Image (cartoon, grey):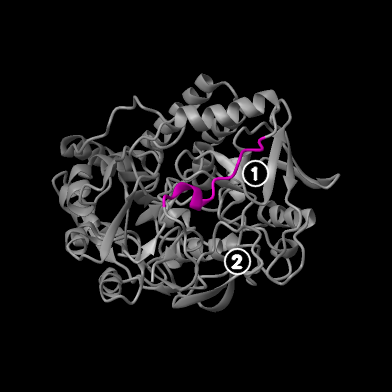
Amino acid sequence: MVDIRKKPLGLDLTRRRFVQSSAMLGLSLAAASFPASRLLAQEPKRGGHLKLGLGGGASADTLDPALASATVAFVIAHCWGDTLVESHPETGEAVPSLAESWSPSPDAKVWTFKIRKDVSFHDGKPMTVADVVATLKRHSGEGSQSGALGLLGSIERIEEKAGDLVITLSEGNADLPLVLTDYHLQIQPNGGMDDPNAAIGTGPYKLASYDAGIRATFERNKEDWRPDRGFVDSVEIIVMNDATARVGALSSGQVHFINTVDPKTVSLLQRAPNLEILQTSGKGFYSFLMHCDTAPFDNNDLRMALKLAVDREAILNQVVGGFGTLGNDYPVNENYALAPTDIEQRVYDPEKAAFHYKKSGHEGPIVLRTSEAAFPGAVDAAQLFQQSASKAGIQIDVRREPSDGYWSEVWNAQPFCASYWGGRPTQDSRYSTSYVSNAEWNDTRFKRPDFDELVYRARAELDKEKRKALYHQMAVMIRDEGGLILPVFNDFVNAASKQMKGFVHDIGNDISNGRIASRVWLES
């Protein structure tokens, strides 16, 4: 998964007040957009060829944004496409993109979006409300395999009325504008129904070439509807899944930016006068996933034993290098609005782990699959887990898998593996993406109708304290009964040449929330 950072940014007040008051009062959310250039002290320069060396690509990747599931596909989608709504990089508030404003009904069930006029796709055809309707229907319709399907499950109707987009929900959702920031929901001609892999959108760059798992190249969209982005003439994304290769490419000047820097190499890169480390707070996490419906992980005592057998402090310090904070086996940290703050921190306890392991009745080795493709240091983290679990009498057999194909053949396929998840705009979208029973990416196979009901109740609840209490209950349920082992929320740690300017630290997700290519520029 694409998608990392920790420090609290006060989102409870800003984002919650913004969304809740708008939904309750029925106000138009004509919030001003926040282009990257306004966040910067320097004046952007135009021109040049930007090269990005990125891990997180595979030969099985696709240009269809509905199926995009890892870092390279995430960044590619933001090069050529636009979503209806974006999120502010510092506060997480919903801000306009292809939708210039929006307003809800008093119960937040019916939302009306004003869609920008005079915006064209890369092929010259005008973007219309019909294209927007078709896009959302493709991602939310019956049989959809979109990664956004779980986010859109409450939609009853998507239609054009009097030139506006109108979305009718089965229940109120105060977070709907932020749901529509999801990177899968790039607006395509006829919704991508004709050719979902065409990579034709309204974004800052036009696709020039694509070789899955190897590279993608783009040329600036000279007809871009936004003048505050797309500063370079061309972009080249080079897939570099090997961390050492990425560091070497940046150090030798072959690329301007690399992602997921191993903390062990930070001090080395910091010594280079022409390079800089880019550390950003966010919501992503490193984890180990267990399928709750697959033996032996269908036994909650075994799941609890493994949760107690992981030394989180060791992984934070030795693998993440301190660039993060401890996780507590639920997928939300302080960067989310209304996040739980009083749940007891789970700690490494081999005696309790041994108790639950014996109670589970399991005997013999447990296979844990891992790969450097999962997250930086994933192999080391698995080996530390193996060592700490052995002190509880639990034998973990660490299997190192190839990087290529990890996200298509291991993650969401094998019952116990290392994984990485980037952040989501809201707690609702976080849980809806991978914990509600029918979510396409329910990668722990946690399927509980009572949990689903809590998600639906929280989604429609406009009272802040009541909603927070529901989120607390959901977190405890995942923590104590789910299949997620979450040792750390990690900071995004990337590196760049000092020739690259204008990088925007965005709490929404890694690599400037996937929008690095549209936001940065090059000094000659």
Q: Residue at x 51, y 61 (%)?
A: 518
Give x and y (percent) for residue 44. 47, 60
Q: Residue at x 49, y 43 (%)?
A: 430
Q: Earlier in the sequence, mark 1 or mark 2?
A: 2
In the rendered image, which residue does mark 1 sit on? 153
Q: Nearer the viewer, mark 1 or mark 2?
A: 2
Q: Quadrant of the N terminus?
A: bottom left
Residue, far left:
391
How many residues crowd mark 2 within 10 Å: few (<14), some (14–19), many (20+)?
some
> Of helix, strand and loop, which one carries label 2?
loop
Q: Nearer the viewer, residue 208 or 276?
A: 276
Using residue 20 as the reference point, say whether residue 161 is left or right of it: right
- In the rendered image, residue 171, in percent from the top left (x then y), is placed at 68, 32
Snapshot quadrant of residue 248 = bottom left
Which of the image's four quarters has the C terminus?
A: bottom left
- The answer, for residue 147, to whether it is visible in the render is yes
Mark 2: amino acid:
Asp
Q: Which mark is residue 332?
A: none
Q: Quadrant of residue 19?
A: top right
Visible residue check, residue 293: no
Depth check, front residue: 270 or 284: 270
What is the magenta range?
29-41
Relative vertical location of residue 390 with respect to residue 205 in this rendering, above or below: above
Q: Which residue is mark 2?
A: 64
- Res 156 quadrant in image: top right
Residue 102 % position (x, y)? 70, 39
434 relative position to 335: left or right: right
Kindly identify the amino acid type of the residue bearing the numbered disc 1: Gly
Chief secondary structure of the magenta portion: loop
Seen in the image, is 107 located left or right of residue 60?
Answer: right
